[in-house]
Image (cartoon, rainbow, N blue to C red):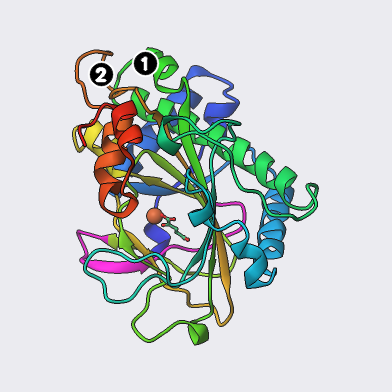
Amino acid sequence: MAAQFPLVDISGYLNPTSPEDKAKVIAQVRDAFKTVGFFQCTGHGIPVSLQRTMFKALELFYSQPKEKKMEISVFKSRCRRGYEASGVHSRDGKAMPDAKESYYFCEDDPEIEMGGIYGPNQWPSIPEDEFRKPIWEYYEKTAAMGKLLWEMLIQGLDRSTNTMERFSRRPLIGMNLLRYPSPEDTAEGQFGLGAHNDWGGITVLLQEPGKEALEIWLEDDKEWVSVPAVEDRFVINCGDMLSGWSGGVYKAVHHRVVNKAPVERYSAVTAWHGDIFATNPFEEPGKSKETVGHLFVKRFQKQMKPSKELLAAIGVEA
Ligand SMILES: O=C(O)CCC(=O)C(=O)O
Ligand SMILES: [Fe+2]
Protein backbone atom coordinates (compact mmCIF):
# COMPACT_ATOMS: atom_id res chain seq x y z
CA MET A 1 0.00 0.00 0.00
CA ALA A 2 2.65 2.47 1.05
CA ALA A 3 4.49 2.01 -2.23
CA GLN A 4 1.52 3.56 -4.11
CA PHE A 5 1.88 6.95 -2.45
CA PRO A 6 2.68 9.59 -5.03
CA LEU A 7 6.33 10.55 -5.17
CA VAL A 8 7.19 13.70 -7.11
CA ASP A 9 10.66 14.87 -8.08
CA ILE A 10 10.36 18.65 -8.45
CA SER A 11 13.89 19.25 -9.77
CA GLY A 12 12.51 19.66 -13.30
CA TYR A 13 10.57 22.71 -12.09
CA LEU A 14 13.52 24.23 -10.24
CA ASN A 15 16.10 23.62 -12.98
CA PRO A 16 14.24 23.02 -16.21
CA THR A 17 16.18 22.10 -19.32
CA SER A 18 13.07 22.53 -21.49
CA PRO A 19 9.54 24.01 -20.99
CA GLU A 20 8.18 20.48 -20.81
CA ASP A 21 10.18 19.80 -17.64
CA LYS A 22 8.18 22.40 -15.71
CA ALA A 23 4.85 21.29 -17.17
CA LYS A 24 5.57 17.70 -16.21
CA VAL A 25 6.18 18.56 -12.55
CA ILE A 26 3.08 20.79 -12.43
CA ALA A 27 0.96 17.92 -13.78
CA GLN A 28 2.37 15.46 -11.24
CA VAL A 29 1.80 17.81 -8.31
CA ARG A 30 -1.73 18.58 -9.53
CA ASP A 31 -2.60 14.90 -9.96
CA ALA A 32 -1.28 14.00 -6.50
CA PHE A 33 -3.36 16.74 -4.85
CA LYS A 34 -6.41 15.79 -6.92
CA THR A 35 -6.28 12.13 -6.02
CA VAL A 36 -4.97 11.87 -2.44
CA GLY A 37 -4.20 15.44 -1.35
CA PHE A 38 -0.62 14.71 -0.49
CA PHE A 39 2.65 13.50 -1.94
CA GLN A 40 6.23 12.76 -1.06
CA CYS A 41 8.72 15.16 -2.56
CA THR A 42 12.30 14.77 -3.76
CA GLY A 43 14.54 16.97 -5.95
CA HIS A 44 13.71 19.99 -3.77
CA GLY A 45 17.28 21.26 -3.42
CA ILE A 46 17.26 21.48 0.40
CA PRO A 47 20.57 19.91 1.46
CA VAL A 48 20.44 16.73 3.54
CA SER A 49 23.13 18.27 5.75
CA LEU A 50 20.72 21.09 6.69
CA GLN A 51 17.93 18.60 7.38
CA ARG A 52 20.23 16.70 9.73
CA THR A 53 21.42 19.86 11.47
CA MET A 54 17.79 20.89 11.94
CA PHE A 55 16.96 17.58 13.63
CA LYS A 56 20.05 17.90 15.83
CA ALA A 57 18.94 21.37 16.92
CA LEU A 58 15.47 20.03 17.62
CA GLU A 59 16.88 17.23 19.76
CA LEU A 60 19.01 19.74 21.65
CA PHE A 61 15.97 21.89 22.35
CA TYR A 62 13.93 18.99 23.73
CA SER A 63 16.80 17.62 25.81
CA GLN A 64 16.59 20.73 28.03
CA PRO A 65 14.90 20.34 31.40
CA LYS A 66 11.19 21.05 31.41
CA GLU A 67 11.62 24.26 33.47
CA LYS A 68 13.97 25.60 30.83
CA LYS A 69 11.47 24.91 28.05
CA MET A 70 8.66 26.42 30.13
CA GLU A 71 10.59 29.69 30.26
CA ILE A 72 9.41 30.24 26.70
CA SER A 73 5.92 28.79 27.09
CA VAL A 74 3.39 29.78 24.40
CA PHE A 75 1.24 31.12 27.22
CA LYS A 76 3.82 33.83 27.85
CA SER A 77 3.50 35.11 24.29
CA ARG A 78 0.64 37.24 22.99
CA CYS A 79 1.46 35.76 19.59
CA ARG A 80 1.24 32.20 20.90
CA ARG A 81 4.81 31.49 19.87
CA GLY A 82 7.05 29.20 21.87
CA TYR A 83 6.89 25.89 23.72
CA GLU A 84 3.82 23.81 24.46
CA ALA A 85 4.14 20.80 26.77
CA SER A 86 2.77 17.32 26.14
CA GLY A 87 -0.88 16.84 27.07
CA VAL A 88 -1.87 20.50 26.61
CA HIS A 89 -3.30 20.36 23.12
CA SER A 90 -6.65 18.63 22.89
CA ARG A 91 -9.08 18.17 20.06
CA ASP A 92 -12.86 18.60 19.99
CA GLY A 93 -14.66 15.54 21.22
CA LYS A 94 -11.53 13.67 22.22
CA ALA A 95 -11.08 12.67 25.84
CA MET A 96 -7.34 12.39 25.59
CA PRO A 97 -5.07 15.33 24.70
CA ASP A 98 -2.24 14.86 22.21
CA ALA A 99 1.02 13.39 23.52
CA LYS A 100 3.19 15.70 21.38
CA GLU A 101 5.34 18.56 22.63
CA SER A 102 5.88 21.45 20.26
CA TYR A 103 7.90 24.56 19.64
CA TYR A 104 6.17 27.06 17.37
CA PHE A 105 7.40 30.19 15.61
CA CYS A 106 6.65 32.37 12.58
CA GLU A 107 8.24 35.32 10.82
CA ASP A 108 10.05 37.36 13.48
CA ASP A 109 8.64 40.89 13.77
CA PRO A 110 9.82 43.29 16.47
CA GLU A 111 6.36 44.72 17.32
CA ILE A 112 3.15 42.94 18.16
CA GLU A 113 0.63 43.82 15.48
CA MET A 114 -2.99 42.88 14.85
CA GLY A 115 -3.59 41.42 18.25
CA GLY A 116 -0.75 38.94 17.89
CA ILE A 117 -0.84 37.77 14.27
CA TYR A 118 2.56 39.38 13.83
CA GLY A 119 5.19 39.82 16.50
CA PRO A 120 8.37 38.46 18.05
CA ASN A 121 9.24 34.81 18.48
CA GLN A 122 10.47 33.39 21.76
CA TRP A 123 13.86 31.79 21.16
CA PRO A 124 15.46 29.34 23.61
CA SER A 125 18.69 30.29 25.34
CA ILE A 126 20.75 27.80 23.31
CA PRO A 127 23.80 29.22 21.46
CA GLU A 128 22.58 30.76 18.19
CA ASP A 129 24.81 28.60 16.01
CA GLU A 130 23.33 25.46 17.50
CA PHE A 131 19.65 26.36 17.31
CA ARG A 132 18.35 29.61 15.92
CA LYS A 133 20.70 29.82 12.93
CA PRO A 134 20.13 26.33 11.46
CA ILE A 135 16.44 26.37 12.35
CA TRP A 136 15.96 29.72 10.62
CA GLU A 137 17.85 28.59 7.55
CA TYR A 138 15.66 25.52 7.35
CA TYR A 139 12.52 27.64 7.88
CA GLU A 140 13.42 30.00 5.02
CA LYS A 141 14.20 27.18 2.62
CA THR A 142 11.02 25.21 3.37
CA ALA A 143 8.97 28.42 3.26
CA ALA A 144 10.31 29.12 -0.24
CA MET A 145 9.31 25.59 -1.17
CA GLY A 146 5.79 26.15 0.17
CA LYS A 147 5.39 29.26 -1.97
CA LEU A 148 6.71 27.48 -5.03
CA LEU A 149 4.21 24.66 -4.54
CA TRP A 150 1.34 27.20 -4.42
CA GLU A 151 2.59 28.52 -7.76
CA MET A 152 2.61 25.04 -9.23
CA LEU A 153 -0.90 24.33 -7.98
CA ILE A 154 -2.21 27.59 -9.45
CA GLN A 155 -0.72 26.67 -12.82
CA GLY A 156 -2.10 23.17 -12.36
CA LEU A 157 -5.59 24.66 -12.64
CA ASP A 158 -4.54 26.72 -15.68
CA ARG A 159 -4.71 29.98 -13.74
CA SER A 160 -2.27 32.85 -13.85
CA THR A 161 0.34 33.18 -11.12
CA ASN A 162 -0.07 36.99 -11.21
CA THR A 163 -2.14 36.70 -8.04
CA MET A 164 0.89 35.37 -6.14
CA GLU A 165 2.35 38.83 -5.76
CA ARG A 166 -0.60 40.00 -3.66
CA PHE A 167 -1.01 36.61 -2.00
CA SER A 168 2.58 36.52 -0.76
CA ARG A 169 2.93 40.18 0.30
CA ARG A 170 3.27 39.38 4.01
CA PRO A 171 2.50 35.69 4.21
CA LEU A 172 1.65 33.81 7.33
CA ILE A 173 4.26 31.04 7.55
CA GLY A 174 4.29 28.99 10.72
CA MET A 175 6.76 26.37 11.78
CA ASN A 176 6.24 23.67 14.35
CA LEU A 177 9.06 21.53 15.70
CA LEU A 178 7.47 18.45 17.20
CA ARG A 179 8.51 15.75 19.61
CA TYR A 180 6.45 12.60 20.15
CA PRO A 181 7.22 10.43 23.19
CA SER A 182 7.88 6.72 22.73
CA PRO A 183 4.83 4.41 22.83
CA GLU A 184 5.94 3.43 26.32
CA ASP A 185 5.51 7.01 27.48
CA THR A 186 2.21 7.47 25.68
CA ALA A 187 -1.02 6.62 27.50
CA GLU A 188 -3.36 3.87 26.30
CA GLY A 189 -5.62 5.31 23.62
CA GLN A 190 -3.63 8.53 23.35
CA PHE A 191 -2.47 9.74 19.95
CA GLY A 192 0.78 11.56 19.27
CA LEU A 193 -1.44 13.92 17.33
CA GLY A 194 -5.13 13.23 16.85
CA ALA A 195 -6.80 12.97 13.44
CA HIS A 196 -7.15 16.33 11.73
CA ASN A 197 -6.91 18.26 8.50
CA ASP A 198 -4.38 21.06 8.27
CA TRP A 199 -6.42 24.26 8.25
CA GLY A 200 -4.67 26.41 5.68
CA GLY A 201 -2.41 26.23 2.67
CA ILE A 202 0.58 24.04 1.94
CA THR A 203 2.27 21.99 4.65
CA VAL A 204 5.90 20.97 4.12
CA LEU A 205 6.65 18.19 6.58
CA LEU A 206 9.85 16.30 7.32
CA GLN A 207 9.72 13.13 9.38
CA GLU A 208 12.73 11.85 11.28
CA PRO A 209 14.13 9.16 8.96
CA GLY A 210 13.24 5.59 9.80
CA LYS A 211 10.59 6.48 12.37
CA GLU A 212 7.19 5.82 10.88
CA ALA A 213 4.42 7.60 12.65
CA LEU A 214 2.41 9.72 10.24
CA GLU A 215 -0.76 8.04 9.00
CA ILE A 216 -3.14 9.32 6.36
CA TRP A 217 -6.74 8.33 5.79
CA LEU A 218 -7.41 6.85 2.38
CA GLU A 219 -11.07 7.50 1.75
CA ASP A 220 -11.32 5.06 -1.18
CA ASP A 221 -9.87 2.17 0.83
CA LYS A 222 -11.37 3.31 4.13
CA GLU A 223 -8.18 2.75 6.04
CA TRP A 224 -5.31 4.51 7.80
CA VAL A 225 -1.96 3.94 6.14
CA SER A 226 1.51 4.78 7.31
CA VAL A 227 3.61 7.23 5.29
CA PRO A 228 7.21 6.00 4.90
CA ALA A 229 9.74 8.09 6.83
CA VAL A 230 12.62 8.35 4.38
CA GLU A 231 15.57 10.73 4.60
CA ASP A 232 15.47 13.66 2.18
CA ARG A 233 11.82 13.00 1.33
CA PHE A 234 9.42 15.75 2.31
CA VAL A 235 5.73 15.10 2.79
CA ILE A 236 3.52 17.76 1.21
CA ASN A 237 -0.06 18.19 2.48
CA CYS A 238 -3.01 20.21 1.26
CA GLY A 239 -4.89 22.21 3.92
CA ASP A 240 -8.62 22.97 4.08
CA MET A 241 -8.29 26.58 2.89
CA LEU A 242 -6.38 25.59 -0.22
CA SER A 243 -8.78 22.74 -0.91
CA GLY A 244 -11.84 24.97 -0.55
CA TRP A 245 -10.36 27.71 -2.72
CA SER A 246 -9.57 25.20 -5.46
CA GLY A 247 -13.28 24.39 -5.52
CA GLY A 248 -12.55 21.04 -3.90
CA VAL A 249 -10.40 19.91 -6.83
CA TYR A 250 -7.40 19.57 -4.55
CA LYS A 251 -8.15 17.37 -1.57
CA ALA A 252 -7.23 18.08 2.05
CA VAL A 253 -6.06 14.81 3.54
CA HIS A 254 -7.09 13.63 7.00
CA HIS A 255 -4.05 12.51 9.00
CA ARG A 256 -2.81 11.65 12.48
CA VAL A 257 0.39 10.61 14.24
CA VAL A 258 0.95 7.30 16.01
CA ASN A 259 4.58 6.82 16.99
CA LYS A 260 5.55 3.21 16.26
CA ALA A 261 9.26 3.57 16.93
CA PRO A 262 10.34 2.19 20.33
CA VAL A 263 11.85 5.61 21.06
CA GLU A 264 10.85 9.30 20.82
CA ARG A 265 10.27 10.70 17.35
CA TYR A 266 10.74 14.19 15.87
CA SER A 267 9.21 15.99 12.93
CA ALA A 268 9.26 19.49 11.49
CA VAL A 269 6.30 21.23 9.87
CA THR A 270 6.42 24.43 7.83
CA ALA A 271 3.01 25.73 6.77
CA TRP A 272 2.69 28.43 4.09
CA HIS A 273 -0.71 30.09 4.17
CA GLY A 274 -0.57 33.45 2.40
CA ASP A 275 -1.12 37.10 3.31
CA ILE A 276 -3.74 37.63 6.00
CA PHE A 277 -5.66 40.12 3.83
CA ALA A 278 -5.31 38.24 0.56
CA THR A 279 -8.23 36.47 -1.11
CA ASN A 280 -8.35 33.24 -3.10
CA PRO A 281 -5.29 33.25 -5.41
CA PHE A 282 -7.04 30.92 -7.87
CA GLU A 283 -9.31 33.87 -8.70
CA GLU A 284 -8.76 37.41 -9.85
CA PRO A 285 -8.49 39.74 -6.81
CA GLY A 286 -11.80 41.25 -5.75
CA LYS A 287 -13.95 38.35 -6.95
CA SER A 288 -14.55 37.04 -3.46
CA LYS A 289 -14.31 38.72 -0.06
CA GLU A 290 -13.06 35.80 2.01
CA THR A 291 -9.44 36.24 3.13
CA VAL A 292 -6.76 34.04 4.71
CA GLY A 293 -7.41 35.96 7.95
CA HIS A 294 -11.14 35.18 7.91
CA LEU A 295 -10.53 31.46 7.54
CA PHE A 296 -7.79 31.48 10.17
CA VAL A 297 -10.03 33.07 12.78
CA LYS A 298 -12.96 30.83 11.85
CA ARG A 299 -10.90 27.72 12.41
CA PHE A 300 -9.20 28.77 15.66
CA GLN A 301 -11.86 30.95 17.28
CA LYS A 302 -12.78 28.30 19.82
CA GLN A 303 -9.34 27.29 21.00
CA MET A 304 -7.59 30.62 20.58
CA LYS A 305 -10.24 33.02 21.87
CA PRO A 306 -8.94 35.83 19.65
CA SER A 307 -8.91 39.31 21.11
CA LYS A 308 -11.31 42.01 19.88
CA GLU A 309 -8.24 43.77 18.52
CA LEU A 310 -7.33 40.79 16.34
CA LEU A 311 -10.90 40.32 15.10
CA ALA A 312 -11.18 43.99 14.24
CA ALA A 313 -7.84 43.95 12.42
CA ILE A 314 -8.90 41.00 10.30
CA GLY A 315 -12.36 42.39 9.70
CA VAL A 316 -14.42 39.81 11.59
CA GLU A 317 -17.23 40.81 13.94
CA ALA A 318 -16.65 39.81 17.56
O1 LIG B 1 4.44 14.96 12.89
C1 LIG B 1 3.89 14.67 11.83
O2 LIG B 1 4.30 13.76 11.11
C2 LIG B 1 2.65 15.41 11.38
C3 LIG B 1 2.39 16.71 12.07
C4 LIG B 1 1.09 17.33 11.64
O3 LIG B 1 0.26 16.73 11.04
C5 LIG B 1 0.80 18.74 11.97
O4 LIG B 1 1.60 19.37 12.69
O5 LIG B 1 -0.22 19.26 11.51
FE1 LIG C 1 -1.22 18.05 10.21
The part of the image, by quadrant, that contains residue 88 is bottom left
Q: SS of the residue at dot 2?
A: loop
Is 234 located above or below residue 111 in the figure? Answer: below
Is 171 located above or below residue 125 in the figure? Answer: above
Give the mark, 2 or 1, whose residue is nearer the N terminus.
1
The residue identified by callout 1 is 163
Foreground: 95 or 56?
Answer: 95
Q: Position of residue 303 (x, y in %)?
A: 31, 54
Q: Are marks 2 and 1 in contact (CB under 8 Å)?
A: yes
Is 214 located above or below residue 159 in the figure? Answer: below
Question: Which residue is rendered at x = 57% and y = 23% of the image?
Answer: 16
Foreground: 53 or 278?
Answer: 278
> In the rendering, which numbered label is found on residue 218?
none
Question: Neighbour class for label 2 at 10 Å: few (<14), some, many (≥20)?
Answer: some
- Range shown magenta: 218-233
The residue identified by callout 2 is 283
Asked if residue 219 can be seen in this view, the reply is yes
Q: Is residue 231 magenta?
A: yes
Q: Position of residue 73 (x, y in %)?
A: 55, 58
Q: Position of residue 306 (x, y in %)?
A: 32, 43
| Prevailing secondary structure of the magenta residues | loop
Question: Which residue is rendered at x = 20% and y = 66% of the image?
Answer: 222
The part of the image, by quadrant, that contains residue 55 is bottom right
Is 183 located above or below residue 150 in the figure? Answer: below
Specify whether 226 is left or right of 81: left
Q: Is residue 116 magenta?
A: no
